[in-house]
Structures are given as structure tokens and as C-alpha cells.
Amino acid sequence: MASRIPLHHRILLGLLAGLILGSVARSLWGDHAALSWTCEQIAYPLGQIFLRLIFMAVVPLVVAALALGVTELGDVHQFGRVGLKTLFMTLLFSSMAVVIGLLLVNWVQPGRGLPPEAQNQLLTALKGADTQVPIEQAAQAKTLTRTLLDFLPRNPLAEAVRALEGGLIPLMVFALIVGLAMSRVGRERAAPLHALLESLFAVMLKIIDFGMQLAPLGVAALIFNVTVTLGWETLQLLSRYVLVVLTGLTLHVLLVYSLALRTFAGRSPLKFFADIREVLLTAFSTSSSNATLPLALEVSAEKLHIDRATGNFVLTIGATANQNGTALFEGVTVLFLAQFFGIDLSWTQQVTVMAMSIVAGVGTAGVPGGSLPMVVVVLQSVGVPPEGIGIVLGVDRFLDMARTVVNVAGDLTIAACVDPARQRA
Ligand code: ASP
């Protein structure tokens, strides 16, 4: 039954219900066997149904999204210098975003502070019995050369089978190579595969949508379990995490975008942001780069006076492939959850998080919550339990609004920087 209350409000209500019921239950029946029974037999399965609907769609979705994303980027060479500059700036901006996020999260450590027993209890509450595996995986740090070499799969099908146990990165590399090859064999010959991947992508997104319909209940159940273990500390940790993401996003806009606008586009950042304020507001209220695209195209040509062909090209590609805010958010979320569960990530694993968050930016759909499957992927690849997304989901919509603003502002900034006319608005 479709409810009139928007989904993101229902998810927030789920978070609050989980928090309140969890802390009441904890203070009234803290040690009671009936409470552990409720956690194991009711809250745990409820949370799992929601999570598994998302997890089951992740692997095919990622393969389709990345192959399609690269095919689009493959068009870049047709646009010569502008295309290459766009590609370069996309990678540069995304890397800087992730670096800002990772520096902040390592400095502030928003997820630290839980005693190890609470962390073990939490893992069991969220994951059931098989919690040791990811922690062991995370502990086995490989050398950098070996890590990089292992990204190239020998047998992509075998990697697909064990994708959720650590084979996702090689599978993603395979998808990237497939995308590259598709853009080289010519449109006509790639068309059937392209259509198949597009349809696979749409169907998997639908399955995630089914999962999201259960999110209010799933989030309530997961947060209930977390709060029974931790009490109100859950809220404290979550608010620190939100603050770190928001600070990172603000710093990225102030430092990276403003500097790029001044140096590469010769524009005043203040005037630029004033000119695009409607676009930013639309991005904030829709949480979708795709939905904001038509207005961004108009403002780019009419107010910023960016060459129309350049604007069309950069903004259309950017709406799906250039997601700086999302990349920053993903890096912070993965490290926050690693801290939360007490998993120490080696520096090679942090570099993996960084690289994957950049790649994930390319594969993220420009729709509300588009980065959710990608966060699962990055979590999985470094051995942090992906069940953790249930913990951050309650506050995700708000962060989604904020990161979409940064995503869209990034597309317009790049368009202004690569604009051959460089007209000053
Ligand atoms: N909502 C974001 C966008 O459309 C994607 C995401 O980070 O979920 O840009």
C-alpha cells in the first residue's frame, strides 16, 4: 500500500522508532532473555530481508552500471581537447574530494569510541553468526603490487560467484574493460549488448527499489538492534558522522571548486554560485543529478554563457559520471563504519577505498540514493560488514541532498573550466 508520507520521511521515522524502542527496551529489560530473543528472532530477520533485497541486486547492477558508464566516457575522445580536459578534471576533482573526506574522517574519527565487547555484540546483532570472516579478511593486508595485480581477474565468472566475499573489484575491472571494448567496436555491433546492459541496469534498480520500500521497517529493526547494544550513543556517533560528511562537502566546494573557477575559468566563485543558485536548490530538493540536468543545461547556457555544445556534453556526462560529493560521502562512510565496527584498515586498504570511491562515482546513478549499492561494494571490498548501511541509511536522505548539490556544482564548475569560449558571466 503506497503511503502518502514520502519514503525518506518514513525511513527517518524508522530510525527514530528504532532508537526510541531500542533504548526503552534496553533500560527496562537490558539483561532479559526475551530481549535477546526479540533481537535475534524478530529484528534481525526483518533487517536482513531489507538488506538482502539490496545485496542480491548489487553484483549485476555494478557490472551493468560500470560498463555503461565507461561506454559513455568512451565518447570523450570524439570531443577532442574538451573531452580529455573533462575526463582529467573529473578524475582530479573526484580524487581531491575523496582525499578531503578521508583526511577528515581519519582526523576526527567519528566512529571510534565503542568498547570492543560492544563492537563484537554489534557485529553479531547485525550479521548473525558469520561475523569473523570480514574481520579476518580486513586484517590480511597484502603488498601494494599484489593488491593491484589481483584487481585483474583471470576468470571474471569465478570472481562473480565470490563477488560478495571479496571478488568485486576484479569484477568491476572486468566491467570497465568490457565498457572500453564496447566503445571501440562501434555503435552498431555493441548495440545489442548495450541494450541488454541497460535493461539489466533498470531491472536491478527496480529490485533495489523493492528493498527500499521495506527500508523504514528494515532501518527500524537494524537501529533497534544497535541501540539495544549501545543505547543513545548510536545517535551521538551518527551525528558526528553527519558533521564530518557535511564539513568535507563544504571544504570541497570552498577549496577545490572556488580555486578551479578562479584559476581555470577566470570567474568569481561568489558570482558563479549566485548565478547557479536555482540549480543548487533543485539539486538539494530532488536529490537527483538527473532530475536537475535540464535546469543545469539552461543555466549553463543562459546565465553562465558557457558554449552550448560544451555545456551539453560536460553536464550530460557529468550527471552520471562526475559525482564528487558522492565519492567523498562513500569514502567517509566506509571509514566511519570500519571505525564503528573496530576494523583497522591498512593504508593499502585505504587506498583501495579511495580508488573504489572514485570509480564508484562513475557507476553511481544520478538518482536519490543512487550511491547505496556502490557503498555496499566498497564496504565489501575492504571487509567491512555491508550490513552497516542499515545504520547510516536513516540519515542518508539529508546527506544525499547535500552531496547532490556538490555533484551538480562540480559538473557546472568543470563546464566553466573547459569552456573554449571562457566568456565571463
Ligand atoms: N543522489 C545523488 C545524485 O543524484 C547520487 C547519490 O549519491 O546517491 O547525484
Image (tube, rainbow, N blue to C red):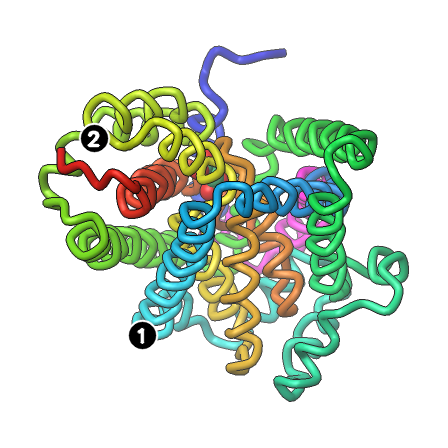
Q: Upstream in the sequence, badge 2 or badge 1? A: 1
Q: Are marks 2 and 1 in contact (CB under 8 Å)?
A: no
Tell me what residue is drawn at x 73 percent, y 52 percent: 175
- Residue 7 locus on image (x, y percent): 49, 24
Look at the picture and state if 91 lies above or below 109: above
The quarter of the picture where residue 51 lies is: top right
The answer to which quarter of the image holds residue 131 is bottom right
Location of mark 1 (residue) = 107
Q: Residues within 10 Å of mark 1 (few under 14, many from 20)?
A: few
Q: Is residue 171 magenta?
A: no
Asked which secondary structure carries label 1, the reply is helix
Q: Which residue is mark 2?
A: 304
Circle 1: residue type: Trp
Residue 359, image x, y percentages = 56, 56
Q: Amino acid at mark 2?
A: Leu
**Residue that appears at 30% across and 31% down:** 307
Please tell me which residue lies in front, 92 or 144. 92
In the rendered structure, the answer to whether residue 60 lies left or right of residue 334 reads right
Range of magenta residues: 25-51
Q: Considering depth in this image, is 222 or 213 the residue closer to the camera?
A: 213
Residue 17 appears anywhere in the view: no
Quadrant where the N terminus lies? top right
Q: Quadrant of the C terminus?
A: top left
Which residue is nearer to you in this view: 195 or 77? 77
